[in-house]
Structures are given as C-alpha cells and as structure tokens.
Image (cartoon, helix red, strand yellow):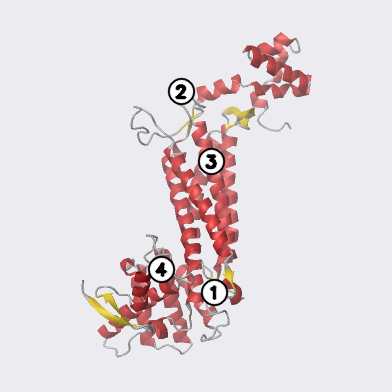
Amino acid sequence: MDYRIEKDTIGEIKVPADRLWGAQTQRSKENFPIGSEKMPIEVIYAFAVLKKSAAISNHRLGKLSADKKDAIVYAADEILTGKLNDHFPLVVWQTGSGTQSNMNVNEVIAHLGSQWLEQQGKEERLHPNDDVNMSQSSNDTFPTALHVAGVIAVEDHLLPAIAKLKETFQSKSEQFKDIIKIGRTHLQDATPLTLGQEISGWEAMLDKSARMITDTVEYMKELAIGGTAVGTGINAHPEFGAMTATEISSFTGKTFISAPNKFHALTSHDEVVAVHGAVKALAADLMKIANDVRWLASGPRSGLGEITIPANEPGSSIMPGKVNPTQSEALTMVVTQVMGNDAAIGFAASQGNFELNVFKPVIIYNFLQSVYLLADSMVAFNDNCAVGIEPNLAKIEHNLHNSLMLVTALNPYIGYENAAKIAKLAHAEGLSLKEAALQSGLLTEEQFDQYVDPAKMIQPKA
C-alpha cells in the first residue's frame, strides 16, 4: 500500500495515500482496534452540516475568508452525498468526547477543501484545527452533531414509521368494529369486546407514544455549539452559537437553537435520556402488540387462531407446511435490544463529570440504533404482517360462545354468587352456560337468552 506522511503535535505518521483523513484519524484508527461498531454515518453527516454552518458563521463574523468558507462548504457537501463514507473509519470505542471523530471530519474537509482551492487556482489552504474547527471544540461540536443526528432520525424516520403502522390499525379497527369476540385478562377468558375495539387499543398506544416522542424531542433541538471547551465559549464570537444554530436549521429544516446554558449542554445528556425513554415506552407497546398478534394467530389448529396473518416464508426446516409469526419475532427481538440500549444510555448519561460527559459516542450509537431499528421493524411489521391481518370468524364465534365469562351479564339479575355457581357448574360438568343456568333453576330459557347477549356487553349502557 502507498503511504504519505502526515504530521500533528505528536509527530509524524503514515496515512494510506488514497485516504483523505490525516494524522489524528490515523492514530485513533491504530490505537483503538476495538470491535466493529463504527461511528454512525448519520453523526458524520450531522458534523458535515455543522462544519459548513460554522464556516458560514465565521465568515459573516469576519474571522474566515470567503475562499476558505467556500472550500469548507464544498467539502462538507461532498460528504453529504455519501460518496466519502469510506473515509470515516473510526469506531465508537474511542475517546469519550468524540474528539477523534470531530478531527476525522475536520481532516477530511481540510484535505478535500485544500484540493478544491488548488483546483480553483487559490493560494490558501485549509487547516483542520485553525480553519475547519474555528470557534469550536470537540466538546461542543460532538454533542451538537449528536442532537442533530438524533432529531433527524426521530422526526424523519421513527415518527413516519409509527404513523404508518397506526394508520393500518386505525383501518383494521374500523373494518372489524362489528366482530364480537371474547376478551382475555390474566390469560383467562373475560367479557366480550369487538376485534375493532381490541385493535383500537394498539392504535392508541402508537398515538400516545408518538406524542410523547414528539414532545420530548423538542429538548434535543437545543445545541451545545458556542460553548467550546468547557461552556464559556472561549475562542468563539458571542454570536457564533446562535448564528450557527440558525444555519443548521436552514440546512436541515429543523428548528434548532443554541442552548441557553452551555455548561449544561456539554456535561448533561438528560434530553437524550428523556427522548430514549419515550422510545422505550414505544418499544414496550410494540412488544405487547407483537405478542398479541402472534397469540391471536397461534395455531392453526391447536392455538387461539382468532386471526390469520400472512404466510411469508416456510417456518421450519423439518416440519412441512409450518408457518411462523416471524414479523412478531423480529419486532420483539428489536424491542429487547432497545431495552438494553436504554440501560446503556441512562448509565452513560449519569457519568457527566465536572464540565464534560465522556460517554458521548456510546450514547449516540445506542440512541440511533434504537431509533432506526424500531423504524425499520415497524415498517416491516406493517407491510408484511399488520396489513394482512384477517379475522377467523368461525374460531371467534366458537370461542365467544364457549366462554364461561359471558355469565358476567347475569350479575345484575341473580347476583355475583349465583352467577359464579352457574359458571362453576358448567365448567365442572362440561355444560354450556345456558345448560348450566337451566339446570340450576335460577333462570328460564327466555330469561337467559334475554340477559346473555354478547352484543349488549361490548359497550356501556346508555
């Protein structure tokens, strides 16, 4: 492999000749051969938006020449095309401030921007620290990129995925609103409801989760930029933070602001904990929904079998014809990962010592993994399962009329204890409720038929 020699304050180091990064990136690459988890590319893209926004602000404030500003904007835009992804090789397991990923971006922009300046016939060249990192510190740029990447992931990927699945459940709830089925609590028979009502609960879970996520993500729109090293803003113009947040907003279409207290913004990640907490609440609801679906579709002969779901692939390597609820299984595995991520994020966020939290890379890695996994799995679950949910009317009818809990309708007429006697008699002797009621002598056939009507049990009486 061909190399070139790069220099930093430590000394000289060999860098692959075809790579755009510099000495600090190379040192990180060699010093942290830990795992395969790369810094999420979404963070790199957020850095690119930040760097060009900072360059524009520094130029307006009279600190950066027009040529250097243009070179930084050009290089940042090249990063945002996705063509340069291979030039960001660093893993998550690096310095806890994310300094080396900040420098990775600085070095790539400086190298590429300098090439562009040369092609334009300009004499100036970019320095990764003096120019690309002007008015900035890794301590405020990494949390800024963290928030920008997180907000984009939530608003552009997670919330639309929730809306898609919610719309499907809304349609199914309306479609199945007149199908009466037996309810279940404690995994035991309960009083009736409609299949539409049952699915409406799933829809409401998604609606509330979306609202909680939408509310909390607003806090992540406060950016640390302008705080520099410890929150005082040393080496940055007093207007730099607010000006750069405005530029970031214009490029992303999101309304970001410069955090009012930079000392908080550098050392605390309570906003991320809050948003991921709402994401965890969504995950908990999705676990319940996925489990409900696979239980209701269990069988096809020996389970509940009250709904059918699409048969997408063979379910067994040994049992011919077996079909499994694989979309539910994938979704519930994602949920377990999200639960683990929440524990990691919460613990990492608790480790803000003095003026800086140094667990930032693992926080954003887990946050983005949760958001993108949930978004992808909800879309897959919707497209490959939820839209194909259909009722098994024969099984629903059988389970409804075979349930002993319809006896609840008799409480107002013969009392709880007498109704319980009928239910126990039916269960002990294998009778229907009607047979047991008539055998008990507590009701006539006409009275039983009048009182025990599932259609009258699915909504409050007027």
Q: Which mark is residue 224?
A: 1
Amino acid type of the residue tagged 4 in the rendering: Tyr
Q: Is residue 448 above or below residue 39?
A: above
The disc, 4 or 1, on the residue closer to the chain's N-terminal end is 4
Tag 3 residue = 289
Tag 4 residue = 45
**Label 1 – label 3 distance at C-alpha:** 38 Å
**Label 2 – label 1 distance at C-alpha:** 59 Å
Answer with left or right where residue 6 lies relative to residue 267.
left
Characterize the local packing of mark 4: few (<14), some (14-19) or many (20 or more) Cα atoms within 10 angstroms.
many
The disc, 4 or 3, on the residue closer to the chain's N-terminal end is 4
The disc, 1 or 3, on the residue closer to the chain's N-terminal end is 1
The disc, 2 or 3, on the residue closer to the chain's N-terminal end is 3
Amino acid type of the residue tagged 2 in the rendering: Arg
Percent from the top left, x then y, of residue 378?
47, 47
Q: Is residue 333 above or below residue 414?
A: below
- Is disc 1 placed on a helix, strand or loop? loop
Give the quadrant of residue 94.
bottom left
- Is disc 2 placed on a helix, strand or loop? loop
The disc, 2 or 4, on the residue closer to the chain's N-terminal end is 4
| Front-lying residue, 137 or 34 | 34
Answer with left or right where residue 352 lies relative to residue 26.
right
Q: Going 51% across and 85% down the picture, which residue do you hit?
A: 236
Q: Going 54% across and 74% down the picture, which residue do you hit?
A: 224
| Front-lying residue, 224 or 56 | 224
Characterize the local packing of mark 1: few (<14), some (14-19) or many (20 or more) Cα atoms within 10 angstroms.
many
Q: Are marks 2 and 3 in contact (CB under 8 Å)?
A: no
- Is disc 3 placed on a helix, strand or loop? helix
Percent from the top left, x then y, of residue 189?
62, 27
Tag 2 residue = 301
